[in-house]
Amino acid sequence: MSLADSGMTLVLGGARSGKSARAMHLAAASDRPVVYVATARDHPDDEEWHARIARHRRERPVDWITIEEPLDLVGVLQRLGQEQLVLVDCLTLWLSNLMLEGLSIERETERLLAGLAKFSGPSILVSNETGWGIVPDHALGRAFRDAQGRLNQQLAAQARRVELIVAGIPVCIKPGRPS
């Protein structure tokens, strides 16, 4: 049994730390079909962002199912079964999408945590550790950083395993327990 075969694994790290690569490695090591849930929204007028999304799409194995869902992660979880491993990349973009849509962060976070608790299959969630950087100089940036920190804490409490990725190296900060 691999690390990704039971419960929830949370993969945290800073920008460009290797979080997505680690999450994909864990998913690929599982013996389950993988459903990759991408939360990024493509912005056709932003060439650099468009190139990032295209690169992420190319890096995914062809036999993985990809669902692009920027907001309704709970709806995705409700449609999937326990035989599949769900990889969500990433909750930081999901949270920013919620904020940009003017949705209630608290309500959506509670909804996600409840949905994950009901989800019977294995999952890997990717999220940025935003609290180690510069304090944003505007209210929206501080609200985002604070909401991300609270979300990560709640997910880590619920997760079976938590890994922090530092310079591409996974550091286990909450080891999983065998079922």
Image (spheres, rainbow, N blue to C red):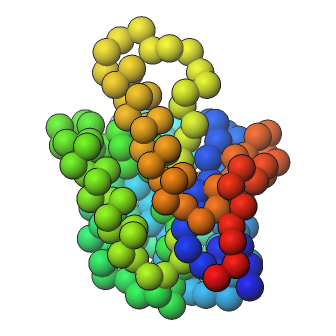
Q: In the figure, 8 relative to 39: above or below?
A: below
Q: Quadrant of the C terminus?
A: bottom right
User: Is 14 situated left or right of 170 in this image?
Assistant: left
Is the residue 3 above or below the residue 68 in the image? below
Which residue of the protein is positioned furthest toward the top in this rendering?
137
Camera-side residue: 31 or 110?
110
For the N terminus, the image quarter is bottom right
Tell me where residue 167 appears, x and y as whole percent: 79, 39
| Residue 145 in sight | yes
- For residue 126, side relative to residue 80 (left or right): right
Residue sitting at x 52%, y 37%? 48
> Considering only vertical position in the picture, is 153 above or below 87?
above
Q: Where is residue 56 in the image (x, y as percent from the top left)?
A: 58, 57
Residue 150 location in percent, x, y? 42, 38
Q: Can residue 57 be seen in this view?
A: no
Q: In this view, does 28 lie above or below 137?
A: below
The residue positioned 21% from the left and 49% from the top of the image is: 107
Task: Please tell me how many numbered marks the rendered image carries.
Answer: 0
Q: Quadrant of residue 144?
A: top left
Residue at image x 55%, y 68%?
8
Across and down, in percent, residue 169 comes to 82, 48
Residue 163 lies left or right of residue 9; in this view the side is right
